[in-house]
Image: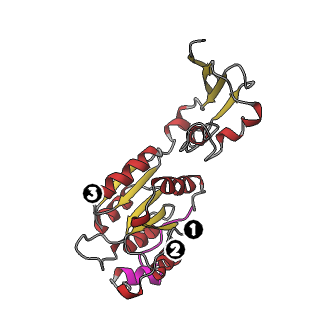
Amino acid sequence: MEMAALIFAGLTVPDWVEISIIDNGPGIAPELHNKIFELNFSGRAGAHPGKLGFGLWWVKTLMTRLGGSVVVESDGQHGTTFILRPAARGEIIMTAQVLRALVVEDDHSWQQILSEILSDCGLEVDVAGSLDEASLSLKIQPHRLAVVDLSLSPNDHNNYDGLRVLDAVRRLDPNCRTILLTGFATVELAVTALTDYGAFTFLRKESFHRSQFRDIVYRILVSPPQLATPLPASGTAASSSAAKGQITPQKTSERKSFGCGR
């Protein structure tokens, strides 16, 4: 049996750095050369259940952000070569954006769970445990997405500071997409989060699944930024009522089960 081998080679040419990764495996069929870079596609999904099909998509996404490219060469029988060509111009590489995520959650266990998943998705994670901490983090630097717990007070189930965080995101970081996470799901609340506060989706803690959450994160990462400018504090009626604390929780008897949004 032939011993497995992996070779790394580098080449510098004008305006480009070329990096080749070469193996002596079974190769990749030519008809799959474009498909392997698609999100959620995995050529090993049958043999390895649970494969996410994320790695090569992220490589291509990162190379594109660096002003470069990635291609694959293989006849499907005699090994595979991946060729990465990031731009060698220093100013392009230095301005490559680091994608950040914000977790706004007062429960330490949920902070750890969400931060771990977001880090695995290639994001730098900031954590806030209150409305004030979240507002400060939003002012310091931009974020690609924010995961926000509805209630930010462990002893007050009528606390709706999460909606105030959604409003702060719209005002301070409008290019950030938000996911509202809660253990108190109602149809009215979901509609409010999605329509009045612009949340990307709405998830219930009691039916939380890591794979579903990762899929939502990937969808946000591949969606184009909104290219908006921050809104003034008094920009909408919803933000005004939120700032005054006029968000009214539903009565327990009116609560209905509601799943993931968009």
For this orientation, the residue located farthest to the left is 155
In this view, the mark in front (1 or 2): 1
Residue 10, placed above or below residue 231: above
Q: Are marks 1 and 2 in contact (CB under 8 Å)?
A: yes
Q: Which amino acid does label 1 sit on?
A: Arg
> In the rendered image, which quarter is residue 66 located in?
top right
User: Residue 43, percent across and down?
Assistant: 64, 37
Determine the secondary structure under disc 2. helix
Mark nearer the N terminus (1 vs 2): 2
Residue 162 lies left or right of residue 106; in this view the side is right
- Point out the tag, 1 or 3, that comes first from the N-terminus: 3
The local crowd at label 1, few if under 14, some if 14 to 19, many if 20 or more residues have their Cα within 10 Å, is: few
For the residues marked 3 and 2, what is the alpha-carbon distance in whole angstroms?
26 Å
Three-letter amino acid code of the residue under disc 2:
Leu
Whole-Å distance between the Cαs marked 1 and 3? 27 Å
Q: Label 2: few (<14), some or many (≥20) within 10 Å?
A: some
Residue 194: image tag: 2
Query: Is there CB contact under 8 Å for labels 3 and 2?
Result: no
Splitting the image into 4 quarters, where does residue 9 fall? top right
Query: Could you say where residue 240 lies in the image, as x and y percent from the top left?
Result: 40, 82
| Dot label at residue 108 | 3
Q: Which quarter of the picture shows residue 2? A: top right
Residue situated in front as seen by the camera: 235 or 7: 7
The image position of residue 10, as x and y in percent, is: 58, 19
| Quarter of the image that includes the C terminus | bottom right
Q: How far apart are marks 1 and 2 (CA)?
A: 8 Å
The answer to if 192 sits in the magenta stretch is: no
Question: Mark 1 touching mark 3, by CB under 8 A?
Answer: no
Residue at position x 47%, y 46% from top? 121
Mark toward the start of the polypeptide (3 vs 2): 3
Give the farthest residue toward the right.
31
Magenta extent: 227-242
